[in-house]
Image (spheres, grey):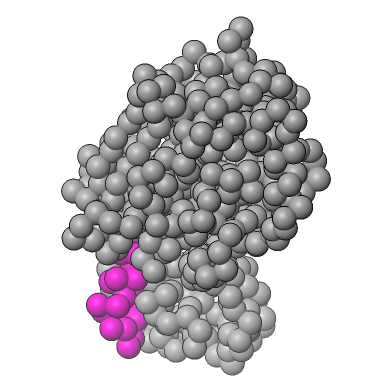
Amino acid sequence: MFTVEKKWNKKNSDEVLVAGITADADNLPPALEKGDKTLVANLETKWENGEISTKNGKVTTMTFLDEGKGLQEIIFVGLGLNAERTLPMLQEAFGAAIKAVNKQKRTKIGVLLDSFSNDLFDDAVTARTFSDAALTASYRFDAYKTEKEEQKAYDFTLYVENGESKALKAGIHHGSANGHGVNFARTLVNIPANDLTPVALAGEAKALANQSDQITAEILDNDELESLGMHALLSVNRGSDQPAQMIVLRYQGEDTWEDPLALVGKGITYDSGGYSIKPGHGMKTMKSDMGGAAAILGAMQTISEIQPKKNVLAIIPATENLINGSAMKPGDVLGSFDGQTIEVNNTDAEGRLILADGVAYARHLGASKIVDVATLTGACVVTLGDVITGAVSNNDEFYEKLEKSADATGELIWRLPTHPRYDEMVRSSDVADLNNSPGREAGTITAGLFIHAFIHDIPWVHLDVAGTAFIERETPFGPKGATGVMVRTLAELAQR
Ligand code: BES
Ligand code: ZN
Ligand code: ZN
């Protein structure tokens, strides 16, 4: 799908050509001067007339008659000013480029990669970002459409004049691995809840493990959960006809199995709210309530391709949150794997219940650090919208490491504060140790700190993806629906 070559020349004019164009540029990309004379003259006129936009992410597609070669298509991608470019802007530009490519009939695509690189983003980074975008910007979910649009297979040739091919190839591989992980996560979230049950989710995890020599899978069923005392997870599961699953994957990147980084994901395959039932409009998208679990499985896919030298433990408590005659009720008091008791003030605050057992199990299995990812609170959607993922942490050093990983992948996270008063709120139950829903105030923080009560002193970061995992608008990075957010960040963290 991707090949690297040093020089573009007009012999390749059966390709659609993609070129970046910055607002600093006085001229067209130098490589283009090697094209046909009339073509170059035509382009220069268009450029001088200001018909080629340099605004970041703005695409100008042009068709020329190239003497002797017939029609030639060039897609110019605006890059704004070199000094102002951020990684999300570069991702946006490549996303727009891929969408323009998708509109073309031709499937042979040449990319003047040099024209996208600058002092901040070298060729390896642009190659990684491009191969990622090539997979993720054109993602579609049409598994349930009886008539499917044809998915074209593209041959991309990346032209890099001074490219060191080893670093470039690694960049392309890394970007593709990210793309595979992100698209896998998206598909898991997009599959409706009647098909993606907890058992089906566990099946996907086992299939992932079967593809890799370094990953093993273990699935705990209701009987095993019962004997381990996972009452928080089991209580949420009581209202459902589908069995619960505790999904455990182990990726061994080191010689011995020690000190794994644990990734724990909320795997509510459908959230009706339970007896604290959601209104209809809030329920409609709740197949996406396993977006945290999907991020972790997507990251494990990426990790299996990049093969970092780090042990990674993935833990996904999975169940539906539904209603029947045995379902948990507001006012119930639950036990947990960790031993602490929980008063259920609101059955719709179910994510923190299953994560309580999830993170406690991660500790039990020897996790040295824990990241949990969850579509946890509507409050986070109110706070940060669909733009930025919320974070809560008990450890500055570990948080900074995660933040750097997010920065390196262009994903956006923002840390919320902790305070002893918020911990008191989490513990404000008259009858039990903890209260699963102390109220609307500081809702994202108290949800995070509830999980923290089961972390104790292990370095931990909680990522609330309620706003970012499933979105209602198309972006340059992909269609509306599931985003696969945090896959890249988690895989990057494992590498670091
Ligand atoms: N799954 C929801 C959170 C959510 C809301 C995710 C919107 C994505 C979009 C979660 O289980 C929930 O309902 N949380 C409650 C907690 C409250 C009862 C303390 C909420 O946010 O309202
Ligand atoms: Zn809920
Ligand atoms: Zn939920």
Q: Is residue 159 magenta?
A: yes
Residue at point 44%, 67% (across, down):
129
Q: Position of residue 256 (x, y in %)?
A: 20, 57
Residue at point 61%, 86% (across, down):
83
Q: Position of residue 172 (x, y in %)?
A: 33, 67
Q: Nearer the viewer, residue 151 or 259?
A: 259
Q: Nearer the viewer, residue 168 or 345?
A: 345
Q: Look at the image and give the residue range highlighted in magenta.
A: 157-179
Q: Is residue 344 magenta?
A: no
333 horizontally vs 250: left or right: right
Q: Nearer the viewer, residue 63 or 414?
A: 414
Q: Nearer the viewer, residue 77 or 474?
A: 474
Assign the N terminus to one quadrant of the image: bottom left
- Image quarter for residue 4? bottom left
The answer, for residue 248, to whether it is visible in the render is yes
Magenta stretch prevailing secondary structure = helix
Q: Position of residue 107 (x, y in %)?
A: 36, 57
- Image quarter for residue 21? bottom right
The answer, for residue 74, to whether it is visible in the render is no
Q: Is residue 26 above or below residue 265?
A: below
Q: Position of residue 138 (x, y in %)?
A: 47, 51
Residue at point 63%, 43% (across, down):
450
Assign the C terminus to one quadrant of the image: bottom left
